[in-house]
C-alpha cells in the first residue's frame, strides 16, 4: 500500500479541506476589503522564498500558508468591484470540475491516452463549429488561449496557401493585414512564424474603433501592386482596447473578392453566438476560414479554456507536419480514433474539454447567455452615467462589456489629462475601492473597465464613479 495513493480516507479529508478553502474565495467581501493585495512584490517574494521541505508539512499548515501567502494576496476576481482585465470569475462548478480533470490527468495528444476525453473534445468542437455556422467539414482543437488559437489559424492559412512552407520556409515578402486595434498576439504570431513583425500591415480603424474594410481593400490592392503575397486578413470580434466588433460581412466580402484567407480573432467576442440578443455582433463569422474563441472569457470558464476552428479540416491536418511513430499511429478499420495532438502546437495537453462539458451540462447554455447579456447591460448603464456626469468623458459607445473613459475636470490640457488618468488609476486601485485598467486611445491616456463579473450590479457602477471622484481629490493636477 502506498499511503499517498491508497489511503482514501486521508485523501477525502484533504479534498474536503481544499474544497472549503476554494469555496471560501466565493464568500462576499467584508466591508472595505480590497480587490487585490497591498503587498509589494518584494514582500510577496520573501514570504514565498523558502525551499520545499524534504519531509512535507501537515495539510492544515499547508492550507494556512496557502491562504495567508497566496489566496489572500491574489486579485479577487469575484469581488464585485473588480472591473479590470478580460479575466472572469469562473463559474464555480466549472472550477470544481478541475479536480476531476487533474485526477484523471488524461493527455489529449493521442486518443489511446484519453479515449473519452478525446471523444468529448471532438463533440464539443463540432458544437462550437455548428454555433459558428461552419459546415460538417470543419475541424478544430482546444488550445491554451486566443494567442495559440490565432497562431494556429495563421499557420492553417499558410498550409492552405503555401503547402511547402513547413519544410522550405516562408515566401519572401509575405504580409498579414489587420486593424490597428487587433490584439498583440497577431503580431506575436507573425513574428513566431518567422515572417518578421514588419509583415503586419495594420490599417486604420473607423471612428467606432473597428477595422475599416475599405482600408483593408486598399492595403490588399497595394500589396498586389508590390507583388507581395498575402497570408491572411485578420478581423476582430471584440477588440481588447474597446470591445469593438469588426464588420465581418464586409471583411469577408473583401477577402472573397481577392481570394484571401479570412481569420477572425473571436477570443473575447465569439461567445455572443450563445446570446439571441447579441448574436448580431458576430454576423459574418460563418464566412471565416478560421477563428479563435476563448470560453474562459465570456463563457465564464476557468483558465485555460479556448478553441481554434478551421472551416476545412484538410487545412488543419496540414498545419503541423511531423513524423512521430512513437506517438501517432495511423488508424485502421471503419472506426479509427483521431489523435488530435497532430493538429496543435502542444503535445502535453490536459482535458479541459471535460471541465467545460461539466459546466455546460450543469448550467445550460441559456444561463451562460444571460451572464453574457448582463455584462453588456452593465456597460450600457455605465456609459449612460458617464454621459450624464459633467466631470467624466466616455471615449466611445459600448460595443460589448468594455468601456474606455476619462476623468475630465475643467481647465486641463491634454497632457495634464493624460497624467491625471494614470495617477488616478494607480491611486484608486491602491485605495482598495475597486480595480480598473488603463490604455491609450488615439494617443490619449484613458481609464478602461471590463465588466466581466456576474456579481457586479448597477450600485457598483455608482461606487466606481464616486470612488474615482473621491480619489481625484487627493491628486494635485498641473
Image: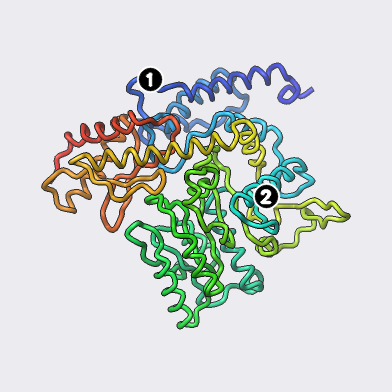
How much space separates mark 1 and mark 2, taking CA atoms? Answer: 44 Å
The circle on residue 38 is none
Mark 2, residue position: 126
The crowding category of the residue bearing disc 2, from other C-alpha atoms within 10 Å (few below 14, some 14 to 19, many at least 20), is many
Pick whichever, 199 or 459, lies toward us: 459
The quarter of the picture where the N terminus appears is top right
Q: Where is residue 312 drawn, in percent x and y?
A: 66, 62
Please, what secondary structure does the residue beneath circle 2 have?
Answer: helix
146 displayed left or right of 423: right
Q: Where is residue 112 drawn, in percent x and y?
A: 79, 46
In this view of the protein, can residue 74 be seen by the observer? no
Q: Contact (CB < 8 A) between labels 1 and 2?
A: no
Above or below, comparing residue 85 to residue 193 in the picture: above
Please, what secondary structure does the residue beneath circle 1 have?
Answer: loop
The crowding category of the residue bearing disc 1, from other C-alpha atoms within 10 Å (few below 14, some 14 to 19, many at least 20), is few
Which residue is drawn at the image coordinates 36% and 57% (left, top)?
A: 209
Pick whichever, 341 or 49, lies toward us: 341
Pick whichever, 23 or 410, lies toward us: 410
Amino acid at each position: 500500500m502506498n499511503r499517498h495513493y491508497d489511503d482514501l480516507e486521508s485523501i477525502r479529508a484533504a479534498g474536503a479541506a481544499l474544497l472549503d478553502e476554494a469555496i471560501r474565495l466565493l464568500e462576499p467581501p467584508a466591508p472595505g476589503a480590497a480587490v487585490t493585495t497591498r503587498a509589494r512584490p518584494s514582500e510577496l517574494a520573501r514570504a514565498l522564498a523558502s525551499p520545499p521541505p524534504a519531509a512535507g508539512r501537515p495539510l492544515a499548515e499547508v492550507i494556512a500558508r496557502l491562504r495567508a501567502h497566496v489566496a489572500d494576496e491574489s486579485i479577487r476576481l469575484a469581488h464585485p468591484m473588480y472591473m479590470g482585465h478580460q479575466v472572469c470569475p469562473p463559474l464555480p462548478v466549472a472550477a470544481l470540475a478541475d479536480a476531476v480533470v487533474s485526477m484523471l490527468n488524461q493527455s489529449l495528444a493521442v486518443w489511446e491516452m484519453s479515449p473519452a476525453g478525446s471523444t468529448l473534445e471532438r463533440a464539443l468542437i463540432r458544437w462550437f463549429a455548428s454555433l459558428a455556422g461552419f459546415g460538417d467539414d470543419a475541424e478544430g482543437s482546444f488550445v491554451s488561449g486566443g494567442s495559440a488559437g490565432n497562431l494556429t489559424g495563421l499557420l492553417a492559412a499558410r498550409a492552405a496557401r503555401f503547402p511547402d512552407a513547413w519544410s522550405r520556409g516562408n515566401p519572401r515578402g509575405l504580409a498579414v493585414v489587420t486593424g490597428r486595434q487587433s490584439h498583440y498576439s497577431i503580431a506575436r504570431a507573425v513574428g513566431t512564424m518567422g515572417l518578421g513583425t514588419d509583415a503586419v500591415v495594420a490599417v486604420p480603424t473607423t471612428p467606432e474603433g473597428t477595422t475599416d474594410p475599405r482600408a483593408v481593400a486598399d492595403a490588399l490592392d497595394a500589396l498586389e501592386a508590390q507583388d507581395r503575397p498575402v497570408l491572411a486578413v485578420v478581423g476582430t470580434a471584440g477588440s481588447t482596447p474597446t470591445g469593438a466588433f469588426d464588420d465581418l460581412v464586409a471583411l469577408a466580402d473583401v477577402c472573397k473578392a481577392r481570394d484571401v484567407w479570412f481569420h477572425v480573432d473571436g477570443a473575447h467576442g465569439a461567445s455572443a453566438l450563445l446570446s439571441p440578443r447579441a448574436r448580431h455582433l458576430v454576423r459574418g463569422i460563418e464566412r471565416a476560414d478560421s477563428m479563435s474563441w476563448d470560453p474562459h472569457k465570456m463563457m465564464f470558464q476557468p483558465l485555460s479554456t479556448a478553441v481554434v476552428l478551421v472551416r476545412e479540416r484538410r487545412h488543419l491536418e496540414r498545419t503541423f507536419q511531423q513524423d512521430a511513430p512513437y506517438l501517432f499511429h495511423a488508424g485502421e478499420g471503419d472506426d479509427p480514433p483521431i489523435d488530435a495532438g497532430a493538429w496543435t502546437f502542444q503535445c502535453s495537453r490536459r482535458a479541459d474539454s471535460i471541465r467545460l462539458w461539466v459546466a455546460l451540462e450543469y448550467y445550460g447554455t441559456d444561463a451562460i447567455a444571460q451572464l453574457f447579456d448582463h455584462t453588456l447591460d452593465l456597460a450600457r448603464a455605465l456609459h449612460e452615467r458617464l454621459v450624464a456626469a459633467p466631470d467624466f468623458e466616455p471615449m466611445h459607445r459600448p460595443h460589448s462589456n468594455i468601456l474606455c473613459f476619462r476623468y475630465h475636470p475643467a481647465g486641463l490640457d491634454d497632457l495634464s489629462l493624460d497624467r491625471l488618468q494614470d495617477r488616478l488609476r494607480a491611486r484608486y486601485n491602491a485605495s482598495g475601492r475597486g480595480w480598473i485598467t488603463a490604455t491609450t486611445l488615439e494617443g490619449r491616456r484613458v481609464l478602461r473597465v471590463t465588466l466581466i463579473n456576474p456579481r457586479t450590479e448597477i450600485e457598483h457602477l455608482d461606487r466606481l464613479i464616486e470612488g474615482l471622484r473621491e480619489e481625484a481629490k487627493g491628486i494635485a493636477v498641473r
